[in-house]
Amino acid sequence: MKPLLVILMGSNADSAHAEKIAAAARPFGIDVEMRIGSAHKTADHVLSLLFAYEADPRPKVYVTIAGRSNALSGFTDGAVASPVIACPPYSEKFGGADVFSSLNMPSGIAPAMVLEPANAALLAAKIFALADPEIRKTVKKIQSANRETILADDARVWSGNHVDIP
């Protein structure tokens, strides 16, 4: 059964942010579905979506995208048993201050928060990797490629001065 990443946006304005998460998740072999619903304006709609997804037996992780007062992440986390990752978009208008609404949740509400869209996808993949050996292999492969990039960059910029490195 292929795992499912549900990306729940607070509004259509979050689409570009959601697309970045989806694009980063697909190489892991994760199915991705994107939906729009507001905890403030369409709470019944959001709950009906969440209840339908929770009835689906596939393993799932939710990524919520909402800025300003991020009620969507806490609302989602309180309604589901699956992990929730808050990935609010950065807002120039608020100078990043709106991120604080994603940091402080009431007791019993515990979404993770990751600001970088690709890292939200990576965290979801690592959660799925706990039970899926193929996703685990892909995570390790991507991590290895990231390490190799850093080492290649280091070799390229190395000044040639000799320093003994243990």
Image (cartoon, rainbow, N blue to C red):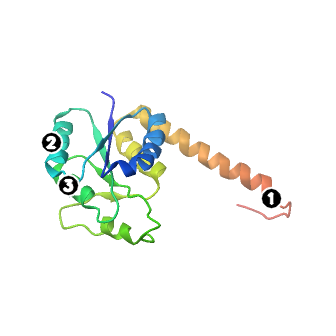
Q: Position of residue 105 (x, y in %)?
A: 24, 66
Residues at circles 3 and 1 in contact by the CB criterion of under 8 Å: no
User: What number is the disc on residue 158?
Assistant: 1
Relative placement, left or right, of 156 versus 150 is: right
Q: Nearer the viewer, residue 1 or 88?
A: 88
Say which of 31 and 48 sits in front. 48
Which residue is at 44% across, 62% downward? 90
**Horizontal side, residue 109 vs residue 121: left or right:** left
Q: Which residue is mark 2?
A: 48
Camera-nearest residue between 53 and 127: 53
Considering the numbered disc 2 on the image, is that residue within a helix, a strand or a loop? helix
Q: Amino acid at mark 2?
A: Ser
Q: Position of residue 103 (x, y in %)?
A: 32, 67
Residue at left offset 27%, top offset 37%: 59
Snapshot quadrant of residue 108 = bottom left
Residue 123, given in percent of the width and then of the height, sits at 41, 49
Precedes in sequence: disc 3 or disc 1: 3
How far apart in space, not on screen, are marks 3 and 2 (Cα)?
14 Å
Q: Residue tagged by mark 3? A: 41
Residue 149 position, x and y percent, is: 66, 48
Cβ atoms at labels 2 and 1 below 8 Å apart: no
- Contact, mark 3 vs mark 2 (Cβ under 8 Å): no
Along the horizontal axis of the image, is 82 left or right of 47?
A: right
The quadrant where residue 165 appears: bottom right
| Distance in Å between CA atoms under marks 3 and 1 | 55 Å
Crowdedness near tag 1: few (<14), some (14–19) or many (≥20) residues, C-alpha within 10 Å: few
Q: Is residue 131 above or below residue 93?
A: above
| x 33%, y 65%: residue | 68
In the picture as drawn, the residue positioned furthest to the top comes out as 1
- Where is 142 relative to 120, above or below? above
Secondary structure type for disc 1 = loop
